[in-house]
Amino acid sequence: MAAELILDARNATGESPVWNAQEQALYWVDIPARRLHRWSPQDLSATSWEAPEMLACIACYGDGSWLAGMESGLFRIQPQHNGTLATELLSSVQHATETMRFNDGRCDRQGRFWAGTMLMDMSKAATVGSVYRYSAGQTEQLTAQLTDMIVPNGLGFSPDGKIMYLSDSHPSVQKIWAFDYDTDTGTPHNRRLFVDMTQYPGRPDGAAVDADGCYWICGNDEGQIHRFTPAGKLDRSLAVPVKKPAMCAFGGANLDTLYVTSIRPGGDISDQPLAGGVFALQPGVQGLEEPLFKG
Ligand SMILES: O=C1O[C@H](CS(=O)(=O)O)[C@@H](O)[C@H](O)[C@H]1O
């Protein structure tokens, strides 16, 4: 099955694709470009808005505004007609060190937002990354729920919400873990290895869980999207025509299209001219509607 290029976006780091069911449109971000993007399959229109800081992960409020993990904290953002984003700080984050930002994030099935932080320069392999949970109405500062990460990534939740997935993309780690997840309190426990990605092509990047409870993970650097069963067994791998797929999300009218964002690295990319593009795959399985942030 061929991946279809839906937008030659040339994103430096295209991340956090989210299907907005209400608008029937795909949103995502380009982290270093500080842009929120929108693409509509109905009229093929592409729009983008400039953020005041790098933004890395988003969750839909359902009223046109978004929760976004940026450099200095979590913000509510609202696209404006002039191409900017109105921003309201929800909760600032006390990073372990300077030059950090949020990275991968998404809501659990109850609508709490989870997101990890990493050094902006990930070549420094310091375990200063943390994973935070943010609930509606939370007034106290964010406190780390999980620490000692380098590049937290691949957050996902099983269809019943009772398993949480998390990975670390750094070349020195490349592991995906599963946790039992208490849906009442939003607490992960019983951390165990789900997949050792050093055994498969590509570093683990962003992920999506489908309606069968299988975990789709982008294999960054190797142009692969892998589907793992809930038991952690590789079910299949799909190719995209770029080396660095970054995150995937189910969307489309029947939630049966897998959208994939990607990274356009510096240097010679003559062998992957579509790098940074957004792709659509028809994998023959359905996804789940992305939970709204219960703000
Ligand atoms: O900035 C990011 O970097 C890495 C991808 S890469 O190592 O630069 O190829 C990615 O894992 C992460 O999610 C992203 O935010």
Image (cartoon, grey):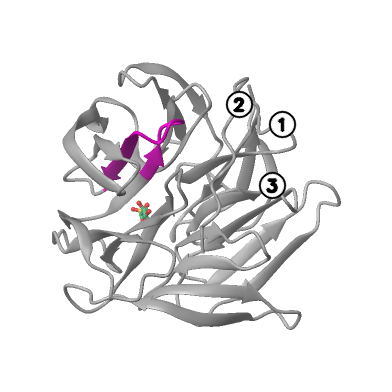
5 sits left or right of 137 in the view: right
Name the residue rendered at 53%, 26% in the picture: 211
Q: Is residue 167 magenta?
A: yes
Residue beneath disc 2:
286
Point out residue 179 in the picture as x, y percentages from the top left corner. Answer: 24, 36
Residue beneath disc 3:
21
Amino acid type for the residue under numbered disc 2: Gln
Name the residue rendered at 30%, 69% in the picture: 120
CB of mark 2 within 8 Å of CB of mark 1?
Answer: yes
Report the label total: 3
Disc with the residue nearer the chain's start (2 vs 1): 1
Residue beneath disc 1:
254
Q: Secondary structure at mark 2?
A: loop
CB of mark 3 within 8 Å of CB of mark 2?
Answer: no
Boundaries of the magenta span: 155-169
Amino acid type for the residue under numbered disc 3: Ala
Q: Quadrant of the N terminus?
A: top right
Residue 143 visible here: yes
Q: Is residue 280 above or below residue 57?
A: above
Disc with the residue nearer the chain's start (3 vs 2): 3
Point out residue 130 in the picture as x, y percentages from the top left corner. Answer: 22, 60
Q: Is residue 218 above or below residue 38?
A: above
Ligand 1's quadrant is: bottom left
